Image (cartoon, rainbow, N blue to C red):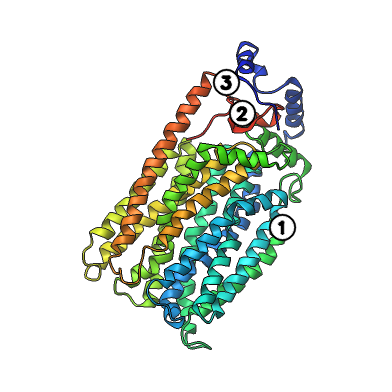
Amino acid sequence: MAEPVTEEKYQQYSESDPGKRSVDPGSVKASETVDFETNSVNEKSLLRKLDIRLLPAVGILYLLSFLDRSNVGNARIEGLASDLGMTGNQYLTGLTLYFIGYVIFEIPCNIVLKRTTPRFWLPTLTILWGIVATLMGIVQNLTGFFIARFFLGVAESGLFPGVVYYFSMWYKRRERQFRISLFFGAAALAGSFGGILAYGIGFLRGTVWEHGWRWIFILEGIATVLIAFGAYWFIHNYPDTAEFLSDKERKFIHARLASDSDATHDERFTWDNVLRAIKDPKCWLYGLSFHTMSLPLYTFSLFLPSIINALGYRAATAQLLTIPPYAFAFLTTIAVATVSERLHQRAIFIIGSAIFAIIGYIMLLANKDPIAHPGLSYAGTFFAAGGIYPATALALSWPAINVSGQTKRAVANAMQISIGNLGAVLGTQLYRSGDGPRYIVGHSFALGYLVGNVIVSSLLYFVLSRENKRRDGVAPEVEEVGHLKDWDGDEDPRWRFQY
């Protein structure tokens, strides 16, 4: 652990030569040497190379993850509930158990990632949940369904926070948000693919089993396992060991990461750094920002087939009608992330996206006869999807760009998902079997949570901007964190938060 830097020490920085505020002379020389050795590296070409090598690989895994967790909504309207003898709200209990397993194992999974490697841990998790997802297709009773859903949540819990931490070891702070948004966009694509696959697999009804829901789990689960085995070869670890990089490119990545983050530090795991995240109020606020989005996100993805089916459409037609809202969500996620990245603004775009989704739920609630006027409710799903997904993607990027200290950032990412998914736990109980077609309770909670997100995002904006102003009066900002030997993480007054 670096020795804490006192305000008296910063006063000395302020009174001395500005060039000494950021790095020591030895570090400057090292940086100049690296620049000399890597002057033939084209930064834009290198970034494209990293994007091509990293984003599709982890994006496919997340697409599979979201597909395997949300395809239960497609299976429900293909006969799942009747075949397993579900009564009342037992289906909702199965959805809740998934998120209980997810929340409990979030932080432990990121600690395992920190102590192993991405190439080992991420594909291994994928194989585990692929096996569970496949087995869900052969469960014979309600108990089996409950057990499978719980362990599916356990196995999937480490992927998203693990990948967010993984990106922080490759990209500069200002580059992570857009990549996280692209990665999260796979969730929207999973919704579209899920609808297409469920529609096609639905034609297998009558093959071995009367209904087609079992084939949805079995075929999609087997595909996950097969792709996961390949992931041991196409997932890379960190820049120092990535085979596709030349020595010059490694040095260049090291130099550019050192210019604005701690990714080049050789930080050993300590429980003290874990506690730093737990004790930081800002980490809890990042969690709350996702908490207020997770309920709308997961109720939408889990219940959209049922919502559309309740408008009077046949099961097969409802599967197809889930595709356009998700496709629209993918486009808005990428568009909002691009503009947000260029303007270096986070909170305002989260708030704007949440308000866009609020309009959708107002449309859904205002339609007093959805069966007679299905178009209004269906249009509302576009607004809901088009706002939920970009707002969630930006909210999830906040700890990745604002938390400094490798272990603290890994824990903060996991905390955010754990706290956030407590909202999903509640959400799984809201769309009850007898509430359709208006689903007043579920839509009202989603609307209220989105309003809550506007409030939390505004609070975070205020807290982070105020803290930056306070630090401006203590010490000048430093960006070349990787060259500092006395760096103490984001608690260091030389660090500036992005909002």
Question: Mark 3: few, some, or many residues within 10 Å (few <14, many ≥20)?
Answer: some
**Residue 374, quarter of the rendered image:** bottom left
Q: Is residue 432 above or below residue 209?
A: above
Q: Which mark is residue 334?
A: none
Residue 171 visible to an observer of this rendering: no
Q: Which residue is mark 3?
A: 476
Q: Amino acid at mark 3?
A: Pro
Name the residue at the top extreme.
15
Circles 3 and 2, Cβ within 8 Å, touching? The answer is: no
Q: Is residue 123 above or below residue 82?
A: above
Q: Amino acid at mark 1?
A: Phe
Count of numbered circles on the image: 3
Q: Position of residue 378 (x, y in %)?
A: 31, 64
Disc 2/disc 1 C-alpha distance (Å): 32 Å
Disc 3/disc 2 C-alpha distance (Å): 10 Å
Q: Which residue is mark 1?
A: 120
Q: Nearer the viewer, residue 456 or 381?
A: 456
Q: Position of residue 286 (x, y in %)?
A: 49, 43
Badge 1 or badge 3: first in the primary sequence: 1
Q: Secondary structure at mark 2?
A: loop
Q: Position of residue 379 (x, y in %)?
A: 30, 60
On the rendered structure, is 252 left or right of 416?
right
Q: Which mark is residue 479?
A: 2
**Front tag of 3 and 2:** 3
Question: Mark 2: few, some, or many residues within 10 Å (few <14, many ≥20)?
Answer: some
